Amino acid sequence: MFKIGEFSKLSQVPVKTLRYYDEIGLLTAAEVDRFTSYRSYSADQLPRLNRILALKELGLSLAQITRLLDGDLSPEQIRGMLRLKQAQIQQQVQEDQAQLTRVEWRLRQIEKEGTMLDYEVVLKEINPQTVAGIRDTIPTYSSQGPLWAELCAYLAQHKVKAAGPSLTLYYDTEYRERDVDVETLTPVSTPLPESDRVKVRELPGGLMACVVHQGAYDTLGEAYSQILAWIQAHGYRIVGPNRDVYLRCPDNDYTDSLASGYKDYLTEAPADYVTEIQIPVAKT
Amino acid sequence: MFKIGEFSKLSQVPVKTLRYYDEIGLLTAAEVDRFTSYRSYSADQLPRLNRILALKELGLSLAQITRLLDGDLSPEQIRGMLRLKQAQIQQQVQEDQAQLTRVEWRLRQIEKEGTMLDYEVVLKEINPQTVAGIRDTIPTYSSQGPLWAELCAYLAQHKVKAAGPSLTLYYDTEYRERDVDVETLTPVSTPLPESDRVKVRELPGGLMACVVHQGAYDTLGEAYSQILAWIQAHGYRIVGPNRDVYLRCPDNDYTDSLASGYKDYLTEAPADYVTEIQIPVAKT
DNA sequence: TCTTGACTCTCCTCCTACTGGAGGGCGTAT
DNA sequence: ATACGCCCTCCAGTAGGAGGAGAGTCAAGA
């Protein structure tokens, strides 16, 4: 029989840990003195402790190890547990390697730029939503005004309010100076009749690379170049039309409807505009 | 300005998390109502939140992100942080892959044997220790008795007590039926003169594959075959003579000296013997 | 026999990044 | 008036211990 310190030295396990294992019933001391509460361990508890250490190195939790060692599990269950663990570790390795890619990308960016950038690309799972919108080909990117006016008028006419921030979809797969194929959309939560121009449909969700941009719209270009470089560097490809979501913009019905009474805080200076670029992606 | 739920929807971050970030000062609400304590968030806090999410995906802690975003860090420090993180992830991947190897090995063992085994191999860092010992070539493995008698007598004569469990080193690199080159050793903590037969030296430590065996010595063979198979399967090689450490055995001076008064608990049935096999290894 | 120093005990707090729930206030629509 | 949805704060819990306070125990030396 050994005192806890001796047993700790023999097994290379800290005293604190032995006490903890005793407490949770994973390795109860062979004997506890009734008067002093000193724990005594026996040499034949070493095999069990060794099994505990070995199973811990497989990544099992102490609760799992307890059940396993107490024989509560059939060999079938043990196999299942290990296979599950195997899958978890594999996924963990995948994730870590993706993380490593991201860190290395950031390091390279810093080496190149001398400091950190203002744009941070994040992957998000975007939910589908019901939207009303107008698709049209317009002369240039910046001439969306009439489309918005038309859409807003239509919504107002049917007394329908926006259910979220409006957005624009860009359908062109290559950059075009003129005759751009765009769709201006506003989320709605109430039924709405369609018209010749205004269509209502379910906008699909999915995995998107996102970046939030603050400032006037003519400075969106840098954000776009960052996000595109990110997508390429991290091994994704674009699988749908990209979106500009107008989180803060002039005459924002959404802001109005959501936080009525706060509108006086809303400035309309372009430097305060907040736009999120979302690009649907998938792993190549 | 948005209420917390609206901001949560826009950013895809749970309300609880936003409150937590507010509490720790990572993203404080733009405004808090003096009377209701309602938090208000502004759209131009979205870029910051996005940066937080992006940095979190690099594996940084919230405390690190806080300092980073508050500009407390020089670009140099940021580089250092990222490089450290990079190294950590790389190590993590290494570890996970080793863990995966272990899990897969266990799964194969179960497929083969139908259930889990009684031997669990564990890697340990063994500390060096000062030992007194006799090295000799003896007829067979099981004829170590005279060596032990000689060593014990010598220690008793110099009134030196064991400072830990005794052990045997096996120097043969191949299996031999007879004329085995062994060294019987006992750890000591007090100075001791050497003799013609008994030498005192520092027994080196290092990384060892270990397994604890319970039972008579003639059943050690299975434990050895398991540990050797493990070493090969996990990509290690043997880098020194293997050791048998006698954790519980007949006439154990160590047990006696350590826990005097408990000796009556010590049975001497071979089925109760506990021996740890240690084999020095290194990654191939 | 007394003291000293090494161990040991229990109980408490702390760590990460949240999550879940209780109990209660606030705002709006019916 | 009330019902529902949103919001608040505070408390407890997560895994696996680490660190420390304050007190009791044990063996050896003076």
Image (cartoon, coloured by chain):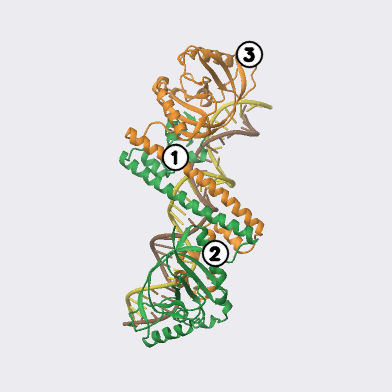
Chain colours: A green, B orange, C brown, D yellow
Q: Is residue B28 visible?
A: no
Q: Amino acid at mark 1?
A: Thr
In-front residue for pair B123/A49: B123
Q: Is residue A109 left or right of residue B97?
A: right
Question: Mark 3 — residue?
Answer: B195
Tell me what residue is drawn at x 51 percent, y 37 percent: A13
Both marks 2 and 1 on one chain: no
Q: At numbered mark 1, what does the secondary structure look like: helix, strand or loop?
A: helix
Q: Residue B2's spot in the image, x, y percent?
A: 49, 75
Spot occupied by residue A72 in the image (x, y as percentages of width and height): 32, 40
Chain identifier of the residue bearing label 1 in the image: B
> CA separation, marks 3 and 2?
72 Å
Residue A188 placement: quadrant = bottom left
- Picture layout, residue B94 above or below residue B59: above
Would you name the residue on which mark 2 appears? A120
User: Of label 1 and label 3, which has the lower sequence position?
Assistant: 1
Question: Mark 1 and mark 3: span between their CA atoms?
Answer: 48 Å
Mark carried by residue B101: 1
Q: Position of residue A95 (x, y in %)?
A: 47, 53
- Identify the residue at image location x=44%, y=76%: A181
> What amino acid is found at the position of numbered circle 3 in the picture?
Ser
